[in-house]
Image (cartoon, helix red, strand yellow):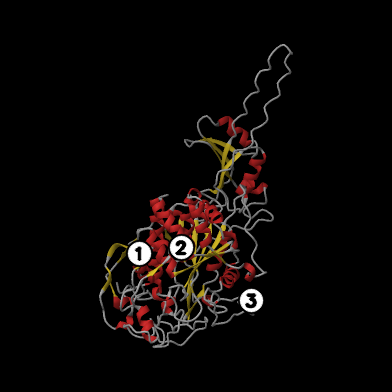
Amino acid sequence: MARPRSEDPTGSAGSGAPGGGSADGAAAGGSGTGTVGAGGSIPAPRTGGRAEARRAAQGKGGRGGAGGDGGSAGSGHRKAGGRGKKPERNMKKIVGWTAVGALVLIAGTGGAIYLKLNGNIKTIDSDGLSKDRPPESAADANGNKPVNILLIGSDSRGAGNSDLGGGNAEGARSDTTILLHVYADHKNAIGVSIPRNTLVTIPPCKLPNGKWTKEQKGKDILFNAAFSQGDSTEGNAACTQNTVEKLTGIRVDHTLVVDFSGFAAMTKAVGGVEVCLPKVIYEGDINPNLNKRGAQVLPAGRQKVEGQQALDYVRLRHGIGDGSDIGRMKRQQAFMSSMISTVKKKGLEPTTLLPLADAATKSLRVDEGLNSVDKLMSFALSLKNIDLHDLKFVTPPWRYSDANLDLVKPDVDRLWEAIKADRTLDGKDATGEQPDAPAAPAAPAATPEAPPTTTAPPARAAAAPIRVAVYNGTTVNGLGAKAGEALKAAQFTVTGVNQAKSTNKATTTIEYGAGQKANAEKVAALFPGATLTSTTAAGISVVLGKDYADANGGAGTAAPGTPAAPAPLPSSVTEEARSADDDICANTSYGSGG
């Protein structure tokens, strides 16, 4: 397949040289030291890298060739996309996780630190959001709602980003964009990377001067052009959010933006991140304009990286595999998984988390719903039960359209529908596994009035609430939530609503463990025709069958007013997914060439 041309920074397809990537490649070059966030000083960039090449092209000295990686020689102008700019993966996804995860400790740090961190946070103005938005997610039977977070990595040249690999042109581009869906059970999450050079429709967006653009669509309108609307140094996060909502039909609840310097500072704050490379990387791989191999930058195998080296790893494209951006996305996924694992392993160590919280809050711009330490901490606590294995990274199904990408229908629509229905990649209904608060105990039975000369006996203790788990053994969407509501109304405690392993169960079954038969019979009274089965598992479970579906909306169809169950996800999504606990040395390159 021929390598496509590069893109114009406005998002229009350009006519750059074949194989030309953008100037957003791994940063290097120049001298000097800059302090970033709480991560300490970032080492002087390496000589011979892309940043130095850019400075040479701009008449600022240094060696390594003009024009950056794939830009016009000497122009210093940012080119976005091209074949090398295929789905640029999740480098900044980790930022959202570390930023909020680090804040769990803040409650006990005292007022001075609280005020310092609170003062770091910058807010994204919400008045640029579209008036025509998808509906909010509905709550499940336990009152839990999924949360959708848009994570944007900016290549802005401001705030010290130029030496670390920020864009050459004025303004900012969305270097990476991830839609993170946290399921209602808050035990599963999926990060969907949206390729920067995807052909999209950009809805009307508000510019810094207060005017609104017209809708933009056509064969040359690319996704990352949304963030550059208005050419401000901060970027247009609201326009990107509007575009994502129009593309997916999913309402975004929160938006976070981070830049390169913030990413580098956070990798230093956690003491480095373990990564793995299949082969040695040299300066010539970081900056092909050197036209020579140069010095070794990163060795092969497992190693720890931080600051500039971390950026080199996640932005590296040449020298591994076929040199396309697919391999880079795979390495970025592995890096983010490793960094999340690092933060989790360190636990609540003040020496790690306080510098990380400082670096993260300095690096972020957030929406109004997350613009304080209290709000970020509350959000962080809501993510603490997500296991690494249950955090997945995917890219929507895509194909080439000349130099750019089209999302493949109907496959991509099935992905959006599964997310809206709160279905995991393996089809599990994650609409509600969080434990309920215990049900209010029943009022004690009245006791006869005792004679005046005697003391009234104590009231009887209320019976302990009966705890029940619900599993939907059918394909009828929303059936488990309906059963959960019925159980709660009858004063049972619903411990979770989930999809059963099998979805072709004919008859509803009440399963119970040792000593629970009497309680199971009380539960069965709500499900006429249900059978009771003893099991070795503790507690009581209701596994709904076709009979319950027939009585509540019809067999094989959704109950009135509820959406149909989404179709199974295509293999193009499920087979390429990465779990956050996968081996960091696995799946880190693409194509031939190493």
Q: Report the residue at 39% width, 54% height from top.
A: 352
Left/right placement of residue 339 relative to residue 553 reads left
Q: Quadrant of the C terminus?
A: bottom left
Left/right placement of residue 5 relative to residue 548 reads left
Taking 351 as reference, is 399 above or below it?
Answer: below
Q: Which amino acid type corresponds to the residue marked 1 in the rendered image?
A: Glu
Q: Which amino acid type corresponds to the residue marked 3 in the rendered image?
A: Pro
Which badge, 2 or 1, comes first in the chain's sequence? 2
Which badge, 3 or 1, comes first in the chain's sequence? 3
Frontmost residue, 566 versus 82 = 82
Q: Label 1, secondary structure: give it.
A: loop
On residue 95, the disc is: 2
Residue at numbered disc 1: 306
Frontmost residue, 350 versus 592 = 350
> Which x, y percent locates residue 12?
52, 83
Distance of label 3 from label 1 (alpha carbons): 40 Å
Left/right placement of residue 4 relative to residue 47 reads right
Task: Report whether residue 41 is seen.
Answer: yes
Distance of label 2 from label 1 (alpha carbons): 14 Å
On residue 204, the disc is: 3
Taking 148 as reference, is 453 above or below it?
Answer: above
Between tags 2 and 3, which lies in front? 2
